[in-house]
Amino acid sequence: MSDPHKLMTKADSLTTLGLTRWSADWSGATALYEQAANGFRLAKNYEKAKTAYEKASKGHEMQSSPWDAAKHMESAAAMSKELSNWREVCDLYRSASELYIGCGRSRPATDALAKGARALEDSMPEEAIQLYTDACTILEEDGGEQMAFDLYRAASNVYIKHEKYTDAASFLLRLGLAADKCNATNSQCKAYLSAIIVYLYAQDFNQAEKCYNDCSQIDGFLKSDQNRCASNLLVAFKDGDIEEIRRLAQSSTISNLDHMIIRLARKLPTGDVNALKADTAKEEEQPLDENDLT
């Protein structure tokens, strides 16, 4: 019997209790649901395939096999993706992740969340970022910060795409912190320079300077090429030197950052740097107040 509709009907009957059936045959039903799911998928009947995969997932759960249940839940999520049913994509990948956590497998759990996040980046960016954030948290709690680097970058890229620059910078700083825990100094320095570039692109010079000063407390960053590049950028901004800003944006230090950050750097300066230069000059001209002890 290869008609997936008939397979589903038979599987449903094996799990329905009645006068003639006192206990559900989850083993027999699950095998039929799996066959039906594959049949529907090949026929491109994604809605029915999704339902069959969900039922197969439940069948494995009932047989105390969370790993197989999680795999089928991921397949159900993939069918929802084919249907562009983004809310379900989010929910089903989250369910798959929870099932992987249930069998103590944090890596596939975060992979499931990341797949969901990638699918949702354009249609539901807030949910995508939440999935990336949850995936990072799982890895952090499991001591797997090194594996979270790409997820931090992906989340900050979604924020940049949707012009939420402060959030993007804070995710890059979180990447820097995770890199610090793994002694991944190069990744850490790149993350800090990236955050400073994001602030400069958003025309928040004060925050860029504060970020630079905070990060320079860390020895690895203080001695790095990325620190020198950030320092030179900030000086060029203060001086209103557009040519120097553009020259630095083409430097190899910036060319080694993520594509999204390189694109921002190449568009610098975005605001009126002469106004910044005027503000800086005004600050320097202010007379010293002898009563001000700060």
Image (cartoon, grey):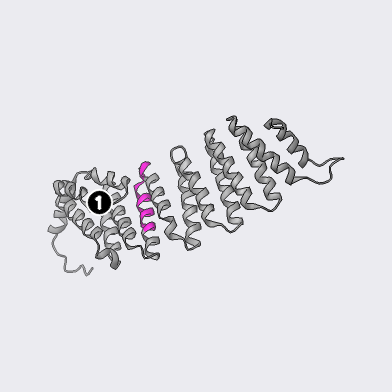
Query: How many numbered discs sit on the rendered protein?
Result: 1
The image quadrant that residue 219 belongs to is bottom left
Q: Is residue 90 left or right of residue 262?
A: right
Identify which residue is drawn at 39% across, 64% down. 182
**Of residues 161 and 277, the one drawn nearer to the viewer in this rendering:** 161
Q: Residues within 10 Å of mark 1 (few under 14, many from 20)?
A: many
Residue type at numbered disc 1: Ile
**How far from the left and from the top, in percent, is residue 28?**
74, 43
**How far from the left and from the top, in percent, is residue 34?**
66, 40
In this rendering, is residue 238 above or below 85? below
Identify which residue is drawn at 37% across, 46% down. 157
Q: Is residue 52 left or right of residue 132?
A: right
**Of residues 32 and 105, the one drawn nearer to the viewer in this rendering:** 32
Q: Quadrant of the C terminus?
A: bottom left
Element type at mark 1: helix
Identify which residue is drawn at 24% across, 65% down. 223
Q: Is residue 84 left or right of residue 20?
A: left
Q: Main secondary structure of the magenta part?
A: helix
Identify which residue is drawn at 44% across, 60% down. 145
**Of residues 170 and 255, the one drawn nearer to the viewer in this rendering:** 255
Q: Quadrant of the N terminus?
A: top right
Q: Which residues are magenta?
A: 160-175
In this rendering, is residue 42 above or below 66? above
Q: Which residue is mark 1?
A: 254
**How far from the left and from the top, in percent, is residue 233?**
20, 53
